[in-house]
Image (cartoon, coloured by chain):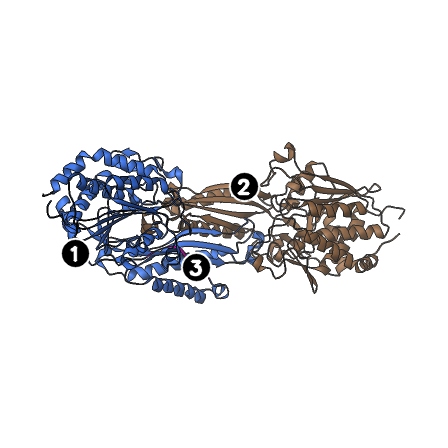
Chain colours: A brown, B blue
């Protein structure tokens, strides 16, 4: 048997509506943290229909909860199951993990959405909805690739392990649980939204929380107090300087197209209790990017050391130092050699299917790739159909053609990487 | 009968411990908004023992709630009564309102207090506690003055109306209710904390709320979004400029000792929902001082006009203008002629009791004086024993000697203003 690009392409064309319908079903499951069971049910059904052996379990247990890289605001995951499907190969081939998360971030300010955030509405070439790009479109491209190979009668030598995980948006507890459960392979692919670029490097990130003190006083005699809001303005400006310093070091050509390779984002601010009082405490929370060329600990030390520099500039901070905590979500950075065999296979199939060179880049955000790489010791590439710039944004969308193109590339990659069973 | 300073002074010395005990009892009633009934019970008992006719009622009714100067976060005041006591004079004398509020602001960050905020602990010459200076010390000086005159057998020609009100800290609904209930007099005194200075001018103030928009994006590609926190920094700096402009106009010698006569305080900031997202909305709340030489409406227009100037500096604000609301607490400014008969009586008694010239100033914060002046048409002076700079502050205190000195001055002022009954 020989399978070529055209067979796969034709299948994708014939099954376009089904693919769109599946993606819409998945988007309509508003799978924010704690609400993933509905969409995981859909995933488990897909995998069973595909002939996979399905393992569905709620993450937990000490090995996970006490792991140094466990990060989640919660410690129990009732009704938030992982789903892993295994399709054993016939033997003698390279195995692969296809990993995708089903959890989505909150939709934010609903008034900024033109279409309801969980509608999955199709307009022209695009489907809209929270999670369609990050990353249900990518997940569906995996299902399409697998369904296509099944329908075309393909059997592979290497095992295919499809991991549908929770908790990616808050630090990877789902993928970590899958790693600790023992799932291993010769390579992994995560179809996070990359605008069809291939990311051999993935940024890590960590969440920080800062407390800035002030001294309260009556608003009518505000000069008697010290405004924690004013002091926070200095802290914000100081953090912006640190971001400049860290990014000035970046020389890797993979970051050429990225305006800020290692951003520091302040996402939350809260301070003060009473309009008529000078505020005495402000809390800031944010996300700091981590390069694959440094450890998480080095990045933390740099931020803590940098904040101490403010003490020299302003005596208030000497007396009332900024308190910093590292909490919640962390993503380990990851990197695969651009020359790794899996990279070569993927790049070749990309060329084959799309007839052009892929763009190689470093990802601007963390993924579970770091966990697979550093904890699972599994070489991982991130490549997917979603539009990076609308992930977490209102009016998130995906260009549907990209989903099917990705599915074709994944199908061809599976054949080349895992190998066709000899008597096909 | 002739009463002189010495009689009154001797009485104060003899009754010092009772006065301190009363103040401590009142401070220990943690009378934050909604929790005033306990302390008002103590006040009603005091007034009954003093022979006043007591009127205790919960503010309410359309005349109050629909009044243009009604300001409160709440519209019902169950269990939050006003107490007004009336001691009818024998006739032919000038009447007086003695007005004091019993509500206190929240204690703030408890860890910043050395003594528990509602202890009323006495250390050396001071008593500590939230509300002791703002303004239960002042209220007790009124009770001491009245008890002293009663014990010395004094009867006055003019009526004495003691108003113990709620809701001063959130905009004056208590005093407004008392004005609308019909209480009127030839002058009024409010012993708010003035560090023993006499305030013929009282600042007004209003609360504002601003909404600053951003555009959300993933924190890893924060350059795709617009941070509402960063935009708020510009707004904060712009507001600081407005404060400079408004204060540069102030020429009144009453403000000579005040670093910022008309402050604009930003007391609350809240924005963003997720550390990994660029924040798309920030809310700011604060308090703007209003001079007796302008109307509230003029001050509002100046702020709104000033914010529109940001549109020229930054196109983002042209597209997404800052939203402003005026809400909650407002204090009308007030002013009495420094030459008014009541001022002359008070200043003279101050000299008499303390043997030195009083300092005349403009108050740095609003009081219910504006309502008495502008709605009640009652000339009002603010003068009291509390320490202005610790009002609303942690470790709020009062110097106890000042309470008794104020009581002496008030007692002498009552005699001179209301007049002694002829056959005394």
Secondary structure state at the residue bearing disc 3:
strand
Quadrant of the image occupied by residue A72: top right
To which chain does the residue with label 2 belong? A
Considering every residue shown, the one lying at the far right of the view is A423
Judging depth in this view, the residue of B354 and A236 nearest the camera is: B354
To which chain does the residue with label 3 belong? B
Left or right: A239, with A220 as reference point: right
Marks 1,3: beta carbons within 8 A: no
Left or right: B50, with A363 as reference point: left
Secondary structure state at the residue bearing disc 1:
helix
Q: Which residue is mark 2?
A: A327
Bounds of the magenta segment? B322-331
Q: Which residue is mark 1?
A: B341
Spot occupied by residue B308 in the image (x, y as percentages of width and height):
42, 65
To which chain does the residue with label 1 belong? B
Secondary structure state at the residue bearing disc 2:
strand
Magenta portion: prevailing SS class: strand
Q: Residue sitting at 72 percent across and 57 percent down?
A: A403
Mark 1 against mark 2, which lies toward the viewer?
1
Judging depth in this view, the residue of B367 and A8 nearest the camera is: B367
Instruction: For marks 3 and 2, give the CA distance.
Output: 35 Å
Quadrant of the image occupied by residue A113: bottom right
Mark 1 against mark 3, which lies toward the viewer?
1
Q: Which residue is mark 3?
A: B325
Left or right: A158, with B345 as reference point: right
């Amino acid at each position: 048997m020989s399978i070529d690009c055209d067979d796969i392409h034709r299948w994708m064309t014939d099954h376009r509506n089904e693919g769109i319908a599946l993606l819409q079903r998945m988007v309509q499951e508003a799978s924010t943290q704690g609400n993933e069971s509905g969409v995981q049910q859909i995933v488990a059904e897909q995998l069973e229909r595909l002939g996979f052996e399905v393992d569905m379990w709620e993450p937990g247990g000490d090995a996970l909860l006490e792991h140094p890289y466990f990060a989640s605001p919660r410690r129990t995951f009732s009704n938030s199951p992982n789903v892993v499907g295994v399709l054993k190969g016939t033997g003698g081939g390279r195995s692969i993990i296809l990993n995708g998360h089903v959890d989505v971030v909150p939709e934010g300010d609903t008034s900024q959405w033109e279409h309801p955030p969980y509608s999955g509405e199709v307009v022209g070439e695009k489907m809209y909805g929270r999670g369609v790009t990050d990353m249900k479109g990518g997940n569906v491209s995996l299902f399409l690739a697998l369904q296509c190979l099944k329908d075309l009668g393909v059997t592979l030598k290497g095992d295919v392990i499809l991991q549908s995980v929770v908790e990616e948006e808050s630090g990877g507890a789902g993928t970590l649980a899958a790693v600790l459960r023992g799932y291993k392979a010769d390579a992994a692919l995560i179809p996070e939204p990359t605008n069809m670029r291939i990311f051999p490097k993935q940024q890590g990130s960590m969440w920080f929380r800062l407390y800035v003190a002030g001294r309260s006083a009556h608003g009518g005699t505000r000069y008697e107090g010290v405004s924690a809001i004013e002091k926070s303005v200095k802290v914000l400006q100081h953090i912006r300087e640190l971001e400049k310093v860290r990014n000035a070091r970046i020389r890797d050509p993979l970051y050429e197209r990225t305006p800020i390779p290692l951003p520091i984002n302040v996402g939350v601010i809260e301070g003060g209790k009473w309009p008529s009082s000078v505020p005495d405490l402000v809390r800031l929370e944010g996300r700091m990017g981590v390069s694959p060329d440094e450890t998480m600990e080095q990045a933390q030390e740099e931020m803590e050391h940098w904040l101490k520099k403010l003490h020299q500039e302003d005596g208030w901070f000497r007396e009332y130092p900024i308190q910093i905590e590292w909490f919640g979500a962390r993503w380990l950075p990851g990197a695969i050699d651009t020359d790794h065999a899996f990279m070569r296979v993927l790049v070749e199939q990309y060329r084959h299917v799309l007839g052009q060179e892929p763009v190689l880049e470093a990802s601007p955000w963390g993924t579970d790739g770091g966990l697979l790489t550093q904890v699972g010791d599994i070489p991982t590439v991130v490549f997917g159909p979603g539009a990076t710039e609308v992930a977490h944004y209102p009016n998130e969308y995906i260009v549907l053609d990209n989903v099917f193109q990705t599915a074709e590339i994944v199908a061809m990659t599976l054949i080349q990487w895992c190998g066709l069973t000899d008597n096909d």
